[in-house]
Amino acid sequence: MKLYEYEGRRLFELYNIPQARSGVASTPSEARAVAEKLSPPYVVKAQVLVGGRGKAGGIKFAETLEQVELVAKKILGMKIKGITVKKVLIVERVDIARELYLGYILNRSLRTIDLLASSIGGIDIEAVAREKPRALIKISIDPILGLQNFMVRRVFKHLNLDSSLFDDFKAIASSLYSLFVEYDCELAEINPLALTADNKLVAVDSKVIIDDNSLFRHPDMLQLKSERLAELSEIERKAKLLGLSYVKLNGNIGIIGNGAGLTMATMDLVSFYGGAPANFLDIGGGARRERVENALSLILEDPQVKVVLINILGGITKCDEVALGIVSALEKHDNKPVVVRMMGTREDEGKAILESRGIKVLESMDEAARVAVNLSKG
């Protein structure tokens, strides 16, 4: 479960990780009320579970209470990568001299916890690894032995911080590691970890992902999950309970794909030909008949959807299983046009099942997208 920044900050507070004072708000007037308890200047940050909010205009600065209210009004309700901003975080602005990165990530292949740190922070750590790999250091931690002092010293030296900051850095690195382990995290990172103009280390942003399978051990996270579900629309809540990767959008063409990349490429093609996706729905790899049936049923129940475009590239996903799921869903719901493109494992069997029910399978993504767009305008 991904945590919003303000939720991650609450965990940081529990573990005494230093950070600027902040508060969360759902309306412009609430944002002003939060800011009244803080000291200017301020940063107003959109709370969404996707990256790139800064480039999308979801992070803005304010000097006065009036500006906080005005900025919050601009951010609340805006869409960032298709996600509507419902809350903003108001934070006391930190006077940053340097931006660093510190994080822990679960390494499933090595069965270790990887400590990552970079002398360049504030941007995606993947970009740092790709463009300036020398700035990044990675240390694999045996989860039985835990974080060792020599590891902290090695990272501290790599970050080239003043020796007077070692105790503070060690406390932050140790606290973040404890949080990571005790909350069964997949990821816990501070980005940026700021070195302030007055020579202090402060966490400016938080990113925490907790293993869903461990939530039963954390009542506070289970409560958070229940609150999240209550905030969702009916269709989003149903998708979440079915375990589907689903995002509601504003168009009228339902999109189903297997794999996030293929699904997003399908959405791009629909947009290219003048259509508008109603959703993102990734059934993932190896989806069986029941999962496909659930996914298509969910889309067919959306009154906003006029036509459904299903794009499947069979690998571990078998086309005949997908076809059986499509047929099952269509037998239970009012007919809406369904456009299918599939290729790969058991492709011939899948096409035969669909074509025996009068569903033609198109040969290319382009053709399928064009047909779906034309049907949506009919």
Image (spheres, rainbow, N blue to C red):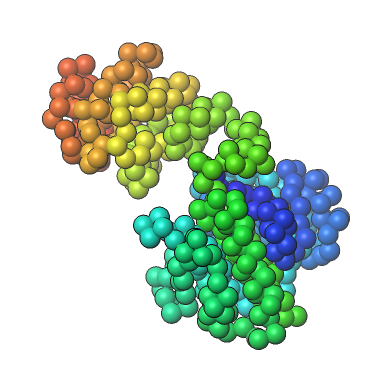
- Which is more toward the observer, 253 or 53? 53
Residue 115, horizontal then vertical, whole percent: 50, 67
Q: Residue at x 54, y 52 (%)?
A: 185
Q: Dividing the image into 4 quarters, which one contains the N terminus?
A: top right
Q: Is residue 219 above or below residue 107?
A: above
Furthest residue in direction left, as rendered = 348
Q: Dividing the image into 4 quarters, which one contains the C terminus?
A: top left
Q: How many marks?
A: 0
Residue 240, visible in the rendered structure: yes
Residue 119, visible in the rendered structure: no
Furthest residue in direction front, as rendered = 144
Residue 360, horizontal then vertical, whole percent: 20, 24
Q: Is residue 208 left or right of residue 308?
A: right
Q: Is residue 133 above or below residue 163?
A: above
Q: Residue at x 63, y 33 (%)?
A: 226
Residue 308, horizontal then vertical, whole percent: 35, 28
Q: Is residue 296 left or right of residue 249?
A: left
